[in-house]
Image (cartoon, rainbow, N blue to C red):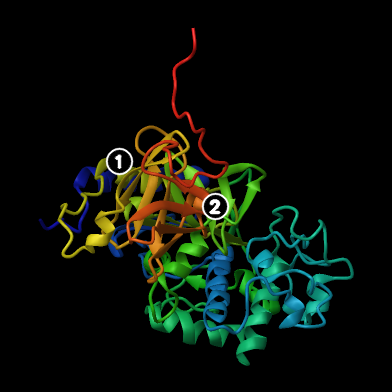
């Protein structure tokens, strides 16, 4: 069945209504938004205060901290090429910063304890010549918290990551970004400096309907934290890449790693988390991955909902007033609820290893019954046969074992242990033993099984 690319009239009207209310209530000079499904743009719209002129999905706006996600992609590429490890201290690859004890992973997840901003003048509205070196970016006391102890958003942290990319590659952060990400993904309208047509940045008076132009500074060393200009169309395409990967840039496994929560924003609260260069939220029962952005004159929001195959971007050219990330999330919700994703038809597997069929079905961890299921991608799922509990997906390792992708067993190895005659004895998962019957005699349950077996309560 062919699914029409264009959304239904009622859905388009609801989307237009949402951005119209946002532009009016936020008193924004202009707002442009787009929604994509499975990588294809299905809707775009805009509202503007200029009569007879409206921006479209190819007009550039400044995207602020969404830039950080692009920088994170460059760092993950270095890791995948074996040029560094995320557990490496920064000092190993970028010596002499004064913050070298922080690991690369901690910088990506904002858990390095660094200050949120630079010392001195407000860096977003002042000349980069005030911060010509990393020493000026970090200041004499770069840390605000113990390293690795808490999430604390840090713009200087992403300056360090940009400088790391430049040091390892031997070219500027901007050139690495252009060659390694923008060109391969076809993001022709994303750049470090504005390219026409582009919006101008404005401040709107809080108590009067008047405007003031905001300065547009070259951020210099701070560029990896917030320099980029982009369009709603390009951002929607970038979100699809974050969902699927692209072997020319990053694998599906590596972008999945970026999307995985690495640090809670509120300790213990996974409703708001941070991955590796991405923000991860639970909203209206959906997991949203992306980033927010702001610089004087601009606010932006980009979200991907993998389970719905949807992405939405909202770009606004005013310093404050419009909650662009909230608007983008609302656009996703409107489409997801009005036109739910139509699932692909069920089809039997083209081929299956007979040995795998021997493993699927019920297993017991103690007295809890779980089910091992074969998935269409060659992996397996392990979770409760009914009700709630620990559930994880596993990818095959090619040697008869599987590695957990998510949940409690993420990173843990699952293997089938066989008897000398080749029959399956049990499953081993991180020292947990799963058997075909609960506490059966002659099963390798740690601690052994009482020789008298199951019994009733004596009267």
Disc 1 versus disc 2: distance between alpha carbons? 43 Å
> What element does badge 1 sit on?
helix
Disc on the earlier residue, 1 or 2: 1
Q: Residue at x 65, y 67 (%)?
A: 105
The quadrant where residue 120 appears: bottom right
From where the camera sits, is residue 178 visible?
A: yes
Residue at horizontal 43 percent and vertical 59 percent from the top: 415
Residue 320 in the image: x percent, y percent? 59, 52
**Does residue 25 sit above or below 52 in this rendering?**
above
Q: Where does the image place residue 314, in percent across and percent down from the top left?
A: 44, 56
Q: Residue at label 2?
A: 431
Residue underneath mark 1: 337
Give the camera-side residue of 34 and 407: 407
Q: Residue furthest top?
A: 459
Q: Nearer the viewer, residue 417 or 159?
A: 417
**Residue 209 appears in the figure:** no
Bin the neighbour count of mark 1 within 10 Å (Cα to Cα): few under 14, some 14-19, many 20 and up. Answer: few
Location of the N terminus by quadrant is bottom left
Residue 154: which disc? none
**49 or 435: which is nearer to us?**
435
Residue at (25% x, 55% y) in the render:
357
Relative horizontal placement of residue 163, taking residue 429 as reference (left or right): right
x 18%, y 65%: residue: 351
Say which of 115 and 79 sits in front. Answer: 79
């Amino acid at each position: 069945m062919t699914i029409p690319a264009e959304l239904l009239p009622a859905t388009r009207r609801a989307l237009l209504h949402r951005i119209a209310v946002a532009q009016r209530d936020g008193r924004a000079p202009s707002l442009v938004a787009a929604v994509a499904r499975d990588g294809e743009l299905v809707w775009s719209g805009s509202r503007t205060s200029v009569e007879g002129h409206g921006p479209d999905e190819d007009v550039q706006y400044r995207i602020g901290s969404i830039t950080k996600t692009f920088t994170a992609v460059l760092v993950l590429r270095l890791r995948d090429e074996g040029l560094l490890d995320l557990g490496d201290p920064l000092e190993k690859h970028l010596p002499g910063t004064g913050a070298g004890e922080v690991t690369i992973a901690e910088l990506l997840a904002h858990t390095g304890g660094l200050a949120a901003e630079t010392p001195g003048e407000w860096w977003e509205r002042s000349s980069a010549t005030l911060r010509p070196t990393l020493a000026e970016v970090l200041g004499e006391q770069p840390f605000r918290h113990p390293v690795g102890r808490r999430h604390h958003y840090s713009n200087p942290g992403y300056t360090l990551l940009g400088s790391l990319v430049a040091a390892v590659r031997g070219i500027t952060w901007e050139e690495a970004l252009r060659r390694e990400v923008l060109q391969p993904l076809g993001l022709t309208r994303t750049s470090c400096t504005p390219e026409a047509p582009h919006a101008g940045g404005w401040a709107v008076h809080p108590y009067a309907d008047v405007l003031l132009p905001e300065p547009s500074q070259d951020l210099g060393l701070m560029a990896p934290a917030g320099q980029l200009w982009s369009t709603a169309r390009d951002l929607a395409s970038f979100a699809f890449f974050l969902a699927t990967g692209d072997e020319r840039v990053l694998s599906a496994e590596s972008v999945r790693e970026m999307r995985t929560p690495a640090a809670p924003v509120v300790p213990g609260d996974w409703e708001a988390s941070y991955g590796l260069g991405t923000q991860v939220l639970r909203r209206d029962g959906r997991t949203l991955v992306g980033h927010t952005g702001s610089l004087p004159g601009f606010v932006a929001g980009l979200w991907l909902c993998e389970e719905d195959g949807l992405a939405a971007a909202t770009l606004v050219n005013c310093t404050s007033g419009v909650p662009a990330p909230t608007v983008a999330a609302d656009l996703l919700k409107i489409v997801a609820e009005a036109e739910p994703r139509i699932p692909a038809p069920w089809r039997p597997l083209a081929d299956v290893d007979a040995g795998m069929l021997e493993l699927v079905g019920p297993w017991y961890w103690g007295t809890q019954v779980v089910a091992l299921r074969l998935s269409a991608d060659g992996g397996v799922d392990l979770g409760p046969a009914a009700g709630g509990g620990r559930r994880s997906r596993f990818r095959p390792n090619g040697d008869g074992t599987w590695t957990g992708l998510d949940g409690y067993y993420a990173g843990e190895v699952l293997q089938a242990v066989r008897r000398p005659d080749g029959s399956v004895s049990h499953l081993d998962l991180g020292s947990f033993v799963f058997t075909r019957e609960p506490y059966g005699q002659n099963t390798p349950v740690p601690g052994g099984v009482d020789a008298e077996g199951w019994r009733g309560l004596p009267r």
